[in-house]
Amino acid sequence: MAELGAGSGSGYPGAVDTKQTFVNGPNPFPDTNARMDAEVLNDVLDALVKIETELGVDPSDAADDTVPAADSAATVLVKLNMILGRLKDIIGGAGWKTAVAITLAALAAHRARHISGGADAFLATDVLEAIVKRLQETGGPTTLVMGAVADGEFLKRSGTTVVGDAGSATDQTARLLAVLGD
């Protein structure tokens, strides 16, 4: 650690410096704005020590593999490492320098092609087909695959599949009366 203003230079980045406090000598006559007062030097040294303190001792490049915990001491470098780590997670690459697979602008353009009125819009039948092929019941929830259902058949769950069931005439009458409320 070195004392700024003592003539021995700075000990940074190995240690955060301290500073002397300077005082003004007698004012020369006439006093002009070309003279540097001690207050200016003290303010500059104070700012420099605060910057060193914020950066910490021995700051280095933001490493791809070093992401500190969110609750660790929040220096500028720590915050930068946290941001770069999150960027690495979003990109899904080996590091924050990895090229993105698709830009946000390209993703928005891709979406615009598939919405209603777009150049390659999804049809209602595309959406319905995706929904009908897989139903999700609320008890599990369990995804149920849609099986074959012929005209006039009822839907019946069989394990994780929904299939058609003709049922007997008695079953059909009972179901119809249940629907009608009789």
Image: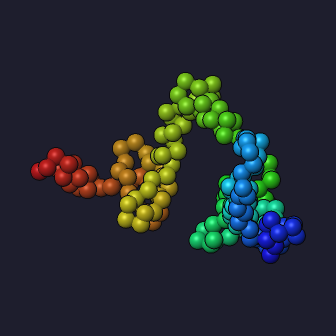
Residue 76 visible, this orientation: yes
Q: In this view, does 157 lie to the left or right of 105?
A: left
Q: Nearer the viewer, residue 26 or 138?
A: 26
Q: Which residue lies furthest to the bottom in this view?
A: 1
Q: Which residue is drawn at 35% across and 50% down?
A: 154
Q: In which quarter of the image is residue 80?
A: bottom right
Q: Residue 39 in the image: x percent, y percent?
A: 68, 55
- Report the number of numbered marks: 0
Q: Residue at x 14, y 49 (%)?
A: 181
Identify the residue at image location x=62%, y=30%. Answer: 113
Q: Is residue 94 above or below residue 71?
A: above
Residue occupying the far left of the picture: 182
How has the structure been colored for display?
rainbow
In the depicted view, which residue is nearer to us: 96 or 100?
Answer: 96
Q: Residue furthest right?
A: 8
Q: Dividing the image into 4 quarters, which one contains the N terminus? A: bottom right
- How far across and down, in percent of the image, does residue 147 sit? 49, 53
- The location of residue 176, given as percent across then percent down, is 21, 48
Above or below residue 71? Residue 135 is above
**Residue 119: percent from the left, percent from the top?**
63, 25
Q: Note whether 149 is above or below 70 in the view shown.
A: above
Residue at position x 37%, y 48% in the image = 153
State whether residue 72 is above or below residue 143: below
Q: In which quarter of the image is residue 13?
A: bottom right
Which of these two is toward me, 146 or 84?
84
Residue 8 vs residue 175, the one in the foreground:
8
Residue 63 shows in this picture = no
